Image (cartoon, helix red, strand yellow):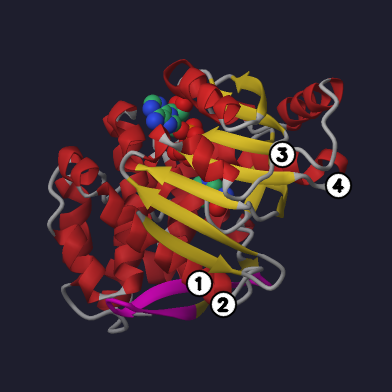
Amino acid sequence: MTTVPVELTNKTYEVKIDQGISQHLGDEVAQVWSPRKVALITDSNVGPLYLDQTQRQLAAAGFEVLPLTVPAGEGSKSFATAGDLIGRLASAGFTRQDGVIALGGGVVGDLSGVVASLYMRGIAFIQIATSLTAQVDSSVGGKTAVNLGDTKNIAGSFYQPDLVLVDSDYLKTLSDRDLVEGYGEVVKTSALDGPEFFAITGEIKSPADIRRQAVELSTRSIAYKARIVMADEKESGQRQFLNFGHTFGHAIELLAHGKLRHGEAIAIGMVTISQRFERDGITPVGITEALKARLTAVGLPTDSDLIGTPEFFQHLVNDKKNRGGVLNLVALAAIGEPVIVKKPIEDMPAFVNGQKG
Ligand SMILES: NC(=O)c1ccc[n+]([C@@H]2O[C@H](COP(=O)([O-])OP(=O)(O)OC[C@H]3O[C@@H](n4cnc5c(N)ncnc54)[C@H](O)[C@@H]3O)[C@@H](O)[C@H]2O)c1
């Protein structure tokens, strides 16, 4: 078992990563929580696969479990669903001494975090991460959120869990498309982290390789994210590096109207921005090709006709990272050496569509 400690100003917790943790979940939870009522929140895909066994193990460890299942998919990250769940906790007599456990991917994690942070102004929270996105990214960092209509993550808070459990066995039932989508973030993290991790993603050639190497990939991704989060809890400085590929990626994700998944759009965003910075001499030649090779090896897209269209630039103007007409873009000065490059919005058409910036 690998344990990654996350030490924050007001709280320290552990991320435990291994194959087979799902067989002793009750013991793991009992190490951080005394017996109490637990709202076990999952979704309609994960629930039928893992809810019964999880509930049984928690009950055997002395917890009184209230199972709650929401429909799978981004639509459940809503105020309505959060409100409904909060009402269910209240009806079941939950107090501030009780807890919420998320059993699922990033959707269930983000939603459950909102519920835990709001219920009676905050009750204890644990995440059991079942998708690759959750196992390498969303379960660590403390960001919780729900969407409002089409506006993603518009309402939420920073709310840290008491424990995060990552078992690579869960990935056996995850679809290849969901797996590969999460892997886009792994490639990103490996490029931000350094040559050792980047060499490991260089060896991954298929979804089967991802599953085989999942413990190593999660451990390294989580360790990197934990390091950044520990240094920059509220996302003012270093945490911006995690946005590598995201400024362009978000724009095309929105323009694609559901045809591109988040991880697919980010893959395109990373390669596109890396190409531009390579052309301008900020990123060394060869890094874009190396990124592209890793992404295409597992079937992720790396280009899109949506890049550089008038609508694309309009989305950059609307980007929440647009600070007073200037975009903070993340460039790779080397593998393991991200830097922030500030670009005025009016320079973006030239930067994206051609001339040396
Ligand atoms: N809080 C953060 O820092 C952060 C970071 C990245 C992403 N996110 C959020 O995470 C969400 C995306 O995460 P996601 O890709 O995990 O989405 P998701 O939770 O919708 O999971 C993807 C799909 O896989 C299914 N699934 C999950 N685990 C499974 C398993 N073990 N077996 C079978 N099916 C399984 C889910 O039911 C769903 O259909 C977005 O809402 C995004 O905003 C948050």
Q: Which residue is mark 4?
A: 121
Tell me: 259 left or right of 41.
left
- Inspect the image, locate mark 2, and give the three-letter code of the amino acid beneath it: Ala
Q: Which residue is mark 2?
A: 231
Q: Nearer the viewer, mark 3 or mark 4?
A: 3
Q: Secondary structure at mark 1?
A: helix
Tell me: 11 left or right of 52.
right
Of residue 198 and residue 118, the one placed in the foreground of this image is 118
Mark 2 Cβ inside 8 Å of ligand 1:
no
Q: Nearer the viewer, mark 2 or mark 3?
A: 3
Which is more N-terminal, label 4 or label 3? 3
Mark 4 Cβ inside 8 Å of ligand 1:
no
> Over which residues does the magenta segment extend?
323-341
Q: Are marks 1 and 2 in contact (CB under 8 Å)?
A: yes
Question: Where, quadrant-wise, is the N terminus in this rendering?
Answer: bottom left
The CA span between labels 1 and 3 is 27 Å
- Residue 321 drawn above or below residue 283: above
- Inspect the image, locate mark 1, and give the three-letter code of the amino acid beneath it: Ile
Of residue 250 and residue 81, the one placed in the foreground of this image is 81
Q: Which residue is mark 3?
A: 99
The CA span between labels 2 and 3 is 28 Å
Question: Where, quadrant-wise, is the C terminus in this rendering?
Answer: bottom left
Which is more N-terminal, label 1 or label 4? 4
Task: Please tell me in which quadrant of the rendered image residue 172 appears.
Answer: top left
Asked whether 334 falls inside the magenta stretch, the response is yes
Q: Which residue is mark 1?
A: 228
The CA span between labels 1 and 2 is 5 Å
Q: Secondary structure at mark 3?
A: strand
